[in-house]
Image: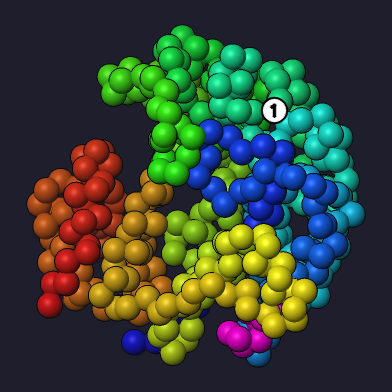
């Protein structure tokens, strides 16, 4: 069965940060010297050239739906550098007229002062890593900013007139009480961001917190925090549209939506992941060289081995991958999206869908599937069912 290539996004990874946070399992590296800004920007564009050529993306150009510049701390790159990068990308891949260009930023003073420069460079949306407004919690999380800097960054984002901006906020922090978690949320809501990412701290392998575990709230306390926090957000006009994403109407993150709708995305930069679909039915997943030294060596030696791994998504794996992404969203899933983006007929999942409906996990409507409250509670069981080859 042929595929209908979905929307195409681009993820750009900037691997450096001032210091590594104890909870962070992202591909980030604490700065030990000046960022090799120009060298890295040129490597990113060469990495993109290699992908475009390899996957023949310039033969039938697909408009770029969104760009997300993540890290690390992308706001350590100068505004001039970001402008150079975005211009270089647009020269290679045409932009949609209403393209969303998001950039992650830390609310430190130096980075905040650059916000206007980033907007001028073409950034339409900034995601500010606040995490907490409590000074003691910020120190425990290894953050280098304070409460006032976080507030200043949000106020500046309003002032310069970005299309949108996001505040990242954590709950379930070490020794955090219900009152403390809700106070954090109240302060975030008072800053009136168009979008709020409100997510629970989890302990990930290969992090400082994994080896030296802090005391976190128990499951009952976490549920109370979520329920009360969700109520506060709803009363303030925020709509939950994915597991940890809340937005005012019209301000959903388009880049994340493309991920969860099983869209395509190129990934350039250290350790970046990509997914590309082809009309002939293939779906390719890619990862790039993870460490900055190895990645820059590819540029310096002019041998271009930016690609670390590449594999084709097998037909048997596509139902699980599709629903693992779609069920992060609370919206209904159009049935035609499954056939168009996986290349599979409905018959491959008919038995599993029927079981999910009988279990009360899904509503099977004429045009779409809608996950139920029961389905959200038993999401792991629901997803596991799609890993089984019904044949």
Question: Where's the N terminus, which quadrant?
Answer: bottom left
| Residue at the disc numbered 1 | 144
- From the top left corner, tell me how far across and down residue 274 is, in percent: 53, 68
Task: Give the left or right position of residue 193, taking residue 280 as reference.
Answer: right
Q: Is residue 211 above or below residue 103?
A: above
Disc 1 crowd, CA 10 A, few/some/many (<14, 14-19, 20+) = some
SS state under label 1: loop
- Is 211 in front, or is 6? 211
- From the top left corner, tell me how far across and down residue 202 is, in percent: 41, 35
Q: Is residue 205 above or below residue 386?
A: above
- From the top left corner, tell me how far across and down residue 145 is, in percent: 71, 25
- From the top left corner, tell me how far across and down residue 157 is, in percent: 77, 34
Q: Is residue 300 above or below residue 231?
A: below
- The answer to which quarter of the image holds residue 104 is top right
Q: Which residues are magenta?
A: 48-56
What residue is shown at x 40% (from left), y 27% (from top)? Answer: 213
Question: Where's the C terminus, which quadrant?
Answer: bottom left
Task: Give the left or right position of residue 79, taking residue 267 as reference.
Answer: right
Task: Give the left or right position of residue 201, taking residue 141 as reference.
Answer: left
């Amino acid at each position: 069965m042929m595929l209908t290539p979905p929307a195409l996004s681009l993820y750009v990874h900037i691997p450096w940060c001032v210091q590594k946070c104890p909870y962070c399992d992202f591909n980030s590296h604490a700065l030990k010297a000046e960022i090799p800004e120009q060298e890295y920007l040129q490597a990113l564009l060469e990495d993109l050239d290699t992908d475009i050529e390899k996957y023949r993306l310039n033969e039938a150009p697909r408009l770029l739906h969104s760009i997300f510049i993540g890290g690390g701390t992308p706001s350590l790159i100068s505004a001039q550098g970001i402008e150079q990068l975005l211009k270089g990308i647009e020269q290679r891949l045409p932009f949609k007229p209403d393209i969303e260009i998001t950039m992650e930023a830390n609310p430190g003073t130096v980075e905040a002062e650059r916000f206007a420069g980033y907007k001028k460079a073409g950034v339409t949306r900034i995601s500010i890593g606040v995490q907490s407004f409590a000074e003691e919690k910020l120190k425990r999380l290894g953050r280098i900013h304070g409460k006032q800097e976080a507030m200043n960054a949000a106020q500046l984002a309003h002032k310069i007139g970005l299309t949108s901006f996001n505040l990242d906020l954590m709950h379930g922090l070490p020794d955090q009480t219900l009152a403390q978690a809700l106070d954090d949320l109240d302060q975030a809501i008072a800053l009136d961001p168009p979008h709020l990412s409100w997510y629970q701290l989890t302990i990930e392998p290969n992090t400082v917190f994994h080896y030296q575990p802090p005391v976190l709230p128990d499951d009952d306390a976490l549920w109370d925090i979520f329920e009360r926090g969700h109520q506060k957000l709803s009363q303030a006009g925020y709509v939950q549209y994915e597991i940890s994403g809340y937005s005012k109407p019209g301000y959903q993150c388009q880049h994340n939506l493309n991920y969860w709708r099983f869209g395509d995305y190129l990934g350039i930069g250290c350790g970046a992941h990509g997914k590309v679909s082809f009309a002939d039915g293939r779906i390719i997943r890619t990862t790039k060289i993870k460490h900055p030294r190895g990645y820059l060596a590819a540029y310096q030696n002019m041998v271009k081995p930016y690609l670390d791994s590449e594999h084709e998504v097998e037909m048997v794996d596509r139902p699980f991958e599709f629903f693992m992404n779609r069920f992060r969203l609370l919206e209904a899933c159009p049935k035609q999206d499954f056939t168009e983006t996986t290349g599979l007929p409905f018959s491959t999942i008919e038995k599993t869908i029927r079981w999910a409906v009988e279990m009360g996990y899904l509503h099977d409507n004429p045009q779409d599937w809608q996950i139920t409250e029961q389905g959200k509670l038993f999401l792991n069981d629901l997803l596991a069912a799609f890993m089984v080859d019904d044949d």
